[in-house]
């Protein structure tokens, strides 16, 4: 999957440099850039982290989820490239960078996948592998079918769907909300950027915290904080109330983003290597 | 599978907020619904946790 993603995404950026109509722009963005990045940048890497890291899985997810936040400072560099060389050249450079950085990573991921496959082949079948994993660890081990039959799986998935509904809804409408209340577009965009920046260390911090106490309690607390902060952000435009609410929202959002996958990983893990994460 | 369910939320949130904003010219109701949705997630999270606390999940 990472190889397919890499090729589609790189070709998407490359095709972007040849765009000469609105319909072609939509096709290239959706079928190239977005499809490519969606296929390989999130799910396969999440699965990889869940399989490889055990002792400090939350921290590993926190570091992974911090990526979008810390990539923020690269935006001015891309802006500078567009201003200096034009957007078509920048699209070509982006394609080359994505391919050059992504290829060794895809090989690395493939190597881990291969070793998993070999382990399954040695065990004889996936079921035998799960049974062996059960004997090696205290974590409950489930096949996909077993996980799907548990209500907890659906409770948790629904809870996270609601969480995504809230955070995506707020993210998309954040700038419009502030502009609607009299803020300038620049100031509103800056606050959105600040929100992402606050969220970045929260992702790694909550990931670290998630490895210490029971992360279920931490998630429940963060969901409560998310609810309260979103309510205040929607009801008031006063800076003294809105800004602290926004900070609480950013911290909750960042924390939940890094905790949700690590929370779920132990219950739905396929056969995995029990390598320890030494951070 | 879990991601598929969660992806539904990413679509619904922005559309719901946009629809309610167009209807009321305010984000108060949309964010109020988001707050209730977060509480719903909080409640579901608690339910999940209680099940884990009371009886450790076993494969069926």
Image: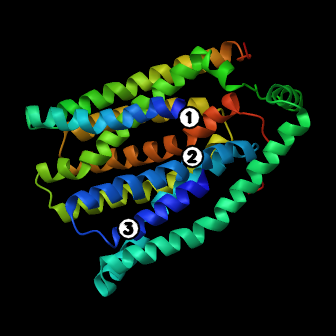
Mark toward the start of the polypeptide (2 vs 1)? 2
Quarter of the image where one finds residue B49: top right
Is residue A210 positioned above or below B60 on the image?
A: below
Can you give x and y, in whole percent of width and height, for residue A130 in the image? 81, 28
Mark toward the start of the polypeptide (1 vs 3)? 3
Q: Provide the chain ID for the residue under circle 1.
A: A
- For the point 70% across and 61% down, the residue is A107
The residue that label 1 is drawn on is A218
Q: Provide the chain ID for the residue under circle 2.
A: A
- Is A54 left or right of A223, judged from the image as shown? right
Dots 2, 1 in contact, CB < 8 A: yes
Front disc: 1 or 3: 3
- Do marks 2 and 1 both belong to one polypeptide chain? yes
Q: Which mark is residue A15?
A: 3
Q: Provide the chain ID for the residue under circle 3.
A: A
- Pick whichever, A203 or A40, lies toward us: A40
- For the point 22% across and 36% down, the residue is B17
Density class for disc 2 (Cα within 10 Å; few <14, some 14-19, many ≥20) is many
Can you give x and y, in whole percent of width and height, for residue A202 in the image? 51, 51
| Color scheme of the displayed model | rainbow
The residue that label 2 is drawn on is A206
Mark toward the start of the polypeptide (2 vs 3)? 3
Density class for disc 3 (Cα within 10 Å; few <14, some 14-19, many ≥20) is many
Query: Is disc 3 placed on a helix, strand or loop?
Result: helix
- Label 1 and label 3: CA atoms lie apart by 44 Å
Can you give x and y, in whole percent of width and height, for residue B14 in the image? 27, 39
Can you give x and y, in whole percent of width and height, for residue A244 in the image? 33, 48
Give the quarter of the figure containing the C terminus of chain A: bottom right
């Amino acid at each position: 999957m990472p190889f397919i993603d890499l090729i589609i995404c790189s070709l998407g950026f490359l095709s972007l440099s040849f765009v000469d109509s609105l319909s072609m722009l939509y096709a290239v963005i959706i079928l190239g850039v977005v499809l490519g990045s969606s296929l390989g940048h999130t799910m396969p890497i999440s699965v990889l982290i869940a399989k490889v890291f055990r002792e400090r899985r939350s921290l590993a997810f926190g570091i992974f989820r911090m990526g979008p936040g810390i990539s923020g400072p690269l935006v001015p560099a891309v802006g500078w490239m567009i201003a200096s060389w034009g957007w078509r050249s920048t699209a070509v450079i982006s394609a080359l960078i994505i391919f050059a950085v992504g290829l060794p990573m895809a090989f690395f991921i493939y190597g881990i996948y291969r070793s998993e496959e070999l382990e399954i082949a040695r065990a004889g079948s996936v079921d035998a592998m799960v049974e062996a994993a059960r004997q090696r660890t205290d974590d409950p081990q489930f096949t996909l079918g077993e996980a799907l039959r548990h209500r907890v799986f659906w409770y948790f998935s629904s809870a996270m769907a609601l969480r995504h509904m809230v955070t995506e809804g707020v993210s998309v409408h954040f700038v419009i909300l502030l502009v609607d209340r009299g803020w300038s577009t620049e100031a509103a965009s800056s606050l959105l950027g600040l929100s992402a920046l606050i969220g970045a260390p929260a992702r790694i911090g909550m990931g670290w915290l998630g490895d210490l106490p029971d992360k279920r309690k931490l998630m429940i607390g963060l969901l409560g904080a998310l609810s309260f902060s979103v309510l205040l952000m929607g009801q008031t435009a006063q800076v003294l109330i809105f800004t602290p609410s926004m900070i609480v929202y950013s911290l909750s959002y960042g924390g939940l983003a890094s905790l949700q996958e690590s929370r779920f990983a132990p219950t739905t893990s396929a056969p995995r290597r029990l390598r320890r994460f030494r951070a | 599978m879990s991601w598929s369910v969660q992806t539904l939320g990413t679509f619904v949130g922005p559309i719901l907020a946009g629809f309610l904003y167009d209807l009321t010219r305010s984000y108060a109701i949309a964010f109020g619904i988001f707050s209730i949705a977060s509480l719903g997630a909080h409640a579901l999270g608690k339910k999940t946790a209680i099940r884990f606390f009371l009886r450790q999940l076993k494969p069926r």
